[in-house]
Image: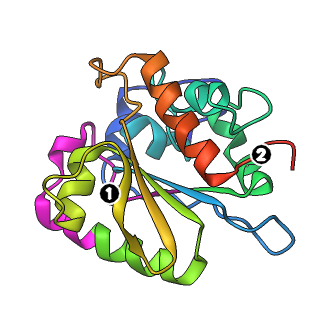
Amino acid sequence: MTTVGRLPDRDELERARDRTLRDVLPAPGDPALRVLFCGINPGLVSAATGHHFARPGNRFWPVLHEAGFTPRLLTPDEQGELARLGLGLTNMAPRATARADELTDDELVAGGQRLRDLVAERRPDRLAVVGIGAYRTAFGRLAAVVGEQDHRLGDTRIWVLPNPSGLNAHWSRAAMVAEFARLREAAGADPTR
């Protein structure tokens, strides 16, 4: 893994292909898991650094803060701070790729089952999937739209958010912040607790 503050070089990125990332989940003594954020899969920068949403230009961390989930802007290497806020991070498909469209539908469907199992075990109040296409494929909900969904996983409510990748340019940062803030208000997530 690369050192903090330095981006991986081309060779490090290529070696990161197909790696997996550990989930960020509350440990004993942390607040209960209120919102579990689920990315599509790790990008190569994330896999090389070991940090979720680590690629420069990814808007996850600024949007999370601006929507009121965190008391300050966190950097990817501070991802462990989320657990103390009752927040978690995971991925739909575990395999790192340069682009999410390198994943197969079978990988997303298998990731949906893994996610069902994780939600059954950890029982977050909300599951927030960032990426409408991955959600549709993984859960067979082809007509789903961004926002709160009409089905649940047990008692866990599901919310689909826009993908914060810089490649998702048709969602402005302000629109993303508004959608993340709607989830925060619905979940009652308070970064000061």
The residue indicated by pointer 1 is 95
Q: Neighbour class for label 2 at 10 Å: few (<14), some, many (≥20)?
A: some
Residue 60: x percent and y percent? 52, 32
Q: Position of residue 129 (x, y in %)?
A: 40, 52
Residue at image point 34% right, 50% down: 40
Instruction: Name the front one of labels 2 and 1.
Output: 2
Q: Is residue 171 left or right of residue 120?
A: left
Q: Give yes or no for contact between labels 2 and 1 (Cβ–Cβ under 8 Å).
A: no
Q: Position of residue 180 (x, y in %)?
A: 52, 36
Residue 21 vertical position relative to residue 112 in the rendered view, above or below: above
Q: Identity of the amino acid at label 2?
A: Asp
- Which of the marked residues, 2 or 1, is nearer the chain's N terminus? 1
* Residue located at (62% from left, 36% from top): 76
- Please tell me in which quadrant of the rendered image residue 106 appears: bottom left
Q: Is residue 98 magenta?
A: yes
Please give the range of residues in magenta: 89-110
Left/right placement of residue 136 relative to residue 46 reads left
Q: In the rendered image, which residue does mark 2 sit on?
A: 190
Q: Can residue 51 be seen from the camera position used here? A: no
Mark 2 residue element: loop
Residue 154 image point, x, y percent: 46, 81
Quadrant in which the N terminus appears: top right
Viewer-closest of 157 and 14: 157
Q: Residue at x 55, y 61 (%)?
A: 23
Instruction: Report the colour scheme.
Output: rainbow
